[in-house]
Image (cartoon, grey):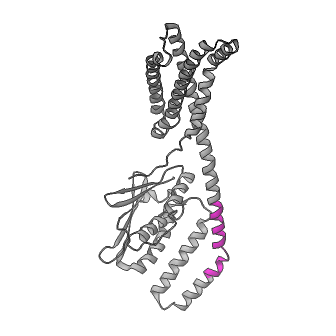
Amino acid sequence: MQYSIMLKPVKIGQILKISLLLALLISLPRSIYIYNMLSDGNLELSRDLLIDFLGRYVFFVVFSWIMLQFNTNTVYLYFKESPRLGVMLSILVNILILILFLNLFNYLFPFITGQEMDDRARGFSNFNYTVLMVVLFFIARVLRLQTDQQESKLENERLKQQNLQSELAALKNQIDPHFLFNSLNSLTSLIRDNKPATQFVNKLSHMYRYILQSGDSNLVTVREELKYLESYAYLIETRYRDRFKLNIEINEAYLDEKLPPMALQLLVENAVKHNEISASHPLKVDIVQRNGSIFVENVIRPRTNLADGTKNGLINLKKRFGLLLKQELIIREDNDIFSVELPLSK
């Protein structure tokens, strides 16, 4: 299963309002003619014209709504990966809808008005629908563009809010960091004779130093990230021992490519948090490179006592990749394997 971000559809209410307005505008000459007939006192004749006007108006509204709905939402939502194919399909379907509507209108016209449509009236009707189709096609593109721009502005505002929250959290975490380093150094001196404990504190100190240093960088090298991950994995292995294993297979050529800081650590932490880790079911996390990307994978064995979390870790990571690398972080669940593909920036 692959997750992707869908485009926001144009609101149905907005499409309906435009359809009603366009149908009224294209029916304006006939409505003026009916008004003049009513003003002259030709009530009997104007009643037939009124029925004719209402029938045509309803058809114009339905035609406009279908065309706008198709051109603003259907084409863009299902063919966003192939815009050229979407445009070609849109033109073809527009013509087909026009032909179907003209045939339907010509067929139902005698039942609505009680009179046959002559060739001149049929030609004028065909002309009106053709002009309306062209106008609707361009209006649909403008609507789509406005909706995408509004959604982009909203997304930028959300990202600004998240950045402000991240900056606030960073400020809280950076309150006198020397105090923590001094405390860790003091702890190391106290446990110098205990090599495992000293190693643990040293790894923890390295992790904290990396977090502070990477806070000023949008991207770090894979080499730096793996060095940090080594310290994090040591802490996890200290807790779970042989029940946890981290397997890293990344070619030397990939080590100087870049990705957002702490991306790998977040994914390993996510695997530890959500999966069972026991003697019978040890957790193995594979970090490998394929096709220019890094993959973080593990077998899915959900914890039975999983605590509720914010569920924002992967969402925020996807947004960071989209914002910093202009690429999509891809999440898959296939054959009980949870896999995250991280594109890299050279």
Q: Quadrant of residue 278?
A: bottom left
Depicted 55 relative to depicted 343: above or below:
above
Please tell me which residue is depicted at 46% across the width and 49% down the height of the picture.
4
Q: Residue furthest right?
A: 39
Question: Does the stretch in magenta take in 100?
Answer: no
Magenta stretch, residue numbers: 163-181
Seen in the picture, residue 230 relative to 43 is either above or below; the reply is: below
Farthest residue, direction left: 280
**Residue in the foreground of this view, choosing between 279 and 23:** 23
Quarter of the figure with residue 245 = bottom left
- Magenta region's main secondary structure? helix
Which of these two is toward me, 80 or 328? 80
Q: Position of residue 195 (x, y in %)?
A: 46, 87
Q: Is residue 278 left or right of residue 146?
A: left
Q: Indicate yes or no whether the magenta region holds residue 171.
A: yes
Q: Position of residue 185 (x, y in %)?
A: 58, 84
* Direction top: furthest residue: 119
Q: Residue at x 54, y 21 (%)?
A: 56
89 horizontally vs 215: left or right: left
Q: How many marks?
A: 0
Q: Position of residue 194 (x, y in %)?
A: 47, 90
| Residue that appears at 45% across and 32% down | 85
Q: Quadrant of residue 52?
A: top right
Compared across the picture, whether 271 is left or right of 156 comes to left
